Image (spheres, grey):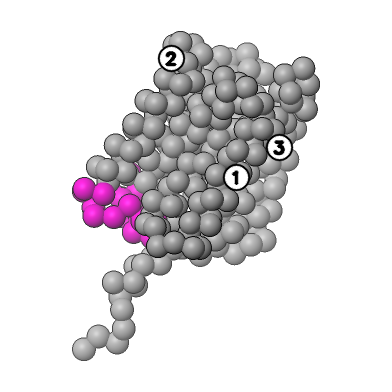
Amino acid sequence: MKNGPEVAFSKVPEVTLIFWIIKVAATTLGETAGDAVSMSMNLGYLAGTGIFAVFFIAAVVFQIAAKKFHPVIYWTTIVATTTVGTTLADFADRSLGIGYAGGTAVLLALVLASLFIWHRSLGSIAVDSVSSPKAEMFYWATIMFSQTLGTALGDWTADTAGLGYVGAGLVFAGLLALVALAYRLTRFSRPLLFWMAFILTRPLGAVIGDYLDKPVAAGGLALSRYSASAVLCAFIAVCILLVPQKAAVRSH
């Protein structure tokens, strides 16, 4: 006789307000840190991508090897996806000449394909189901594609569409607000709403990061990429240390 529902703990955090606050800060850090390495250090997009790819692979290995959810390991891996996503998108869009529109289309297709294959393989794309190595592989692959997509989408909106960093930021903030309203007022698929919000936080962070460190003539504040990255790192660390985070839980 069962005493109650079986509970499975996920390897990722419960989705709360602090999750989204840290996520936006992490995506902004990805933009400033990625630009610091590829531009300020003059290493270029390809070399920057190689450096951050090693960081990303190492972080994912540690994350999957961990026996349970650990905030520091998890958010380090998220930051790794944002930094490599920044330099990879810039390399594809600018160095390879795919362009923002082409890069956005390709990466959107990769995100959708990853979610589709994940759902077909395991039956769920909900974050509270991420408790096995296979599910984590799909989770981090999807995040990697979504972070890269967000960089391309943010640059496309701010530059090609001519909205500027502030205008693009308002657009993505508004879209996130609509997703939040859909969550509160409708019965639309919760996993899909999560991934929509997750994707949208990346271009929001990208344009905030660009606004902080791009020249004044280009519509930015011309702040030091190193200083901005350090402040964002400190902010994320304080959030992790001061606000407890629990692993997402799924009842069976």
Q: What residue range appears in magenta?
A: 119-137
Inspect the magenta stretch and tell me whether residue 29 lies in it: no
Is residue 9 positioned above or below 56 on the image?
below
Residue 230, image quadrant:
top right
Q: Which of marks 1 and 2 is nearer the N terminus?
A: 2
What residue is shown with label 2?
98
At label 2, the amino acid type is: Ile
Total label count?
Answer: 3
What residue is shown with label 3?
230
Percent of width and height locating residue 208: 66, 35
- SS class, disc 1: helix
- Name the residue at 34% across, 32% down: 110
- SS class, disc 2: loop
At label 1, the amino acid type is: Gly
What residue is shown with label 1?
174
Percent of width and height locating residue 169: 64, 36
Q: Which of 240 and 14 is in front in this view?
A: 14
Give the label, 3 or 1, closer to the camera. 1
Q: Which of marks 2 and 3 is nearer the N terminus?
A: 2
At label 3, the amino acid type is: Ala
Q: Nearer the viewer, residue 142 or 102?
A: 102
Give the label, 2 or 3, closer to the camera. 2
Disc 1 from disc 2: Cα separation: 28 Å
Which is the main secondary structure of the residues drawn in magenta? helix
- Name the residue at 62% across, 51% down: 21
Is residue 66 positioned above or below 212 on the image?
below
Q: Which of marks 3 and 1 is nearer the N terminus?
A: 1
Give the label, 1 or 2, closer to the camera. 1
Q: Crowding at label 2, few (<14), some or many (≥20) Cα neighbours within 10 Å?
A: some
- SS class, disc 3: helix
